[in-house]
Amino acid sequence: MSQPSPVTRPRASKLPVLAIVGRPNVGKSTLFNKLVGERKAIVDDQPGVTRDRNYGEAQWAGKRFLLIDTGGLESNADGNLAERIQEQSRFALSEADVILFLLDGKSGLNPLDREAVDPLRKVSKPVYFAVNKIDSRQRADNLYEFYALGLDHLFSISAEHGLGLSELLDSIVEHFPEGEDTDQEHYETVGASLRVAIVGRPNVGKSTLVNRLLGFERSVVDAMPGTTRDSLDTPFALKGDPCILVDTAGIRRKARIEHRVERFSVSRALRSVDRGDLVIHVIDGVEGVTDQDAQILSYARQRGKALVLAVNKWDLVSRAGVDARAYRDRLYHKLSFLDYVPVSFISAATGHGLKKMLEIASHVVGAYRRKIQTSAVNQALQRIVRAHAAPLTQGKPVKFYYGTQTGTCPPAFTLFVNTPRAVPEGYQRYLTHQLRENLGLEYAPIRLILRPRREEKRKRP
C-alpha cells in the first residue's frame, strides 16, 4: 500500500478528522452510523458496499469531530473499481488527524489484515486498532489471535451494540488537535451550511461533476450504472460561501431495482432532495430529459427547493450541431412547471460551463434566501393587480388588501384577500410569476398563501 497522496482538506469546518479504515465488511459503516447517530452509510453483508468516502459530524466527551467512512482496503482486489476504492481509503488517510483501523473479530485474523497493518506502522499520525464484532464470550476468545500482528494495544468493541466504544473514544479524542480548531465557539458547524444536492438518473455524470467541483476524486466513477451507491456529504465552497455537497446515488425506476442495497440507495437519494437547499439536477444531454427526470424535478419543486438544471455531456451534443437555445426551449416545453429554473450546459468530464453554472447557482441561492421589506411587497402587489385584475367571482371583484413575506428558503408571501377561494389557479400562477419578476427573485421558487381579510385583522395589532 502506497503512502497517501497529499490533498487539501475539502471542509468548511476546522474540526479534527477521524478516518475509519479496514478490510471490506468489518463493520466500518455500522460504527460510522453509531457515532453519527443516523443511518447514513449503507450497511450490508456484501463486501465493498461503501464505495466512497462518507463524511459525518460526531461528538464525544464534549469534542466535535468529522468522521470519515471509507471503502475497504483490499490490497489484492481484482478489477479497476476495487483499485479505485483502495485509492479512496488512501485519500482518507491523508485527510485524517487520527486513524482507526477496524478488524473483524467474527471472521478472525485474515492475511490481508497483516498486509494492511504493516504500512500503517509508518504513518506519522495516531493509529488505533480495534477488533469489532466482539459481542459474546465465545468471540472474545478470538481477540487474542490478533496480537500476532505485533500491536501494542487492541481495543475490543461491538459497533452494533456499542460495547467498548467509551474506552476507545476516550483515548482517541485525547489525540485530537487542541486550540481554536476544536473550540465549539470558533469552528463552523457543518449543519449550519447551505446543502447542495446533486441528483439525477444513474450514470448521467453526477459523480464526475462532484469530482470536478471538488478538484479531486471523492466519488468512485465507473461505467457501471449506480457506481455511487451512497449519499455522500462533503464540505465545499460555493463562490466563497461554505456549503455541504450532497452527492447521491442515481434515482432509477423501482422495477429495475433488484438488490436491497440499491433499493435503499434510491430512497436515500430521494431523501437527499429533502436534505438539500439547492438541488442541481443533472440531465444526460445526449439522452435528453425523460419522464423520470420530470418526476424527480416535480418532487423537488413540490418540496420548495432551489433548482438548477445541469445538461451534462454538452460537448458531445454540440458536436452534432444542436443549438443551445433550441435545446432549452424543448426542455422548458416538456418541463413547463419549471419555466423559472435556470439551465446550464456543461461537460463534467472537461469542466466546460462549470464556472457559469456556479455563478447561476450562487444567484439562485441569493434569491432563495432573500428577505423583502413589507412596503416593497405591497408596492409590487399594487402594480401587479393594476396591470391585470383578477376575474370577477359571481359578479363581484376580488380585492387584494395587504401582502407580506412570511418565509424564506423558499420565499413565501401571504396575501390577504376578500375571497381567497375565488382566486383561480391561473391567476395565482400570474401572481407568483409577477412577484418573482417585480421583487428580484429570478430563478427562485415562491410559495403563495392566500388568507381572508378577517384573519389579517385578527392578527394585526
Image (cartoon, helix red, strand yellow):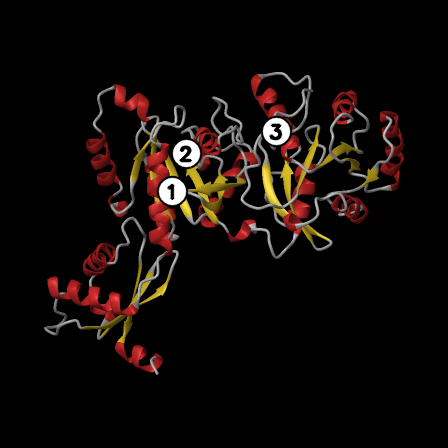
Q: Position of residue 394 (x, y in %)?
A: 13, 72
Q: Residues within 10 Å of mark 1 (few under 14, many from 20)?
A: some
**CB within 8 Å, label 1 to label 2:** yes
Comes first in the chain, label 1 or label 2: 2
Q: Which residue is mark 3?
A: 91
Q: Which residue is mark 1?
A: 296
**CB within 8 Å, label 3 to label 2:** no
Residue at 21% over, 39% down:
333
Q: Which mark is residue 201?
A: 2
Q: Residues within 10 Å of mark 3 (few under 14, many from 20)?
A: many
Residue at 12% over, 66% down:
386
Task: Determine whether 68 is above or below 450 in the image.
Answer: above
Q: Position of residue 231 (x, y in %)?
A: 53, 39
Q: Position of residue 53 (x, y in %)?
A: 59, 34
Cα–Cα span, label 1 and label 3: 33 Å
Outermost front residue:
179
Q: Position of residue 213 (x, y in %)?
A: 45, 33
- Residue type highlighted by circle 1: Ile
Query: Quarter of the image holding residue 17?
Result: top right
Q: Is residue 360 visible?
A: yes
- Residue type highlighted by circle 2: Arg
**CB within 8 Å, label 1 to label 3:** no
Comes first in the chain, label 1 or label 3: 3
Q: Is residue 308 visible?
A: no
SS for callout 3: helix
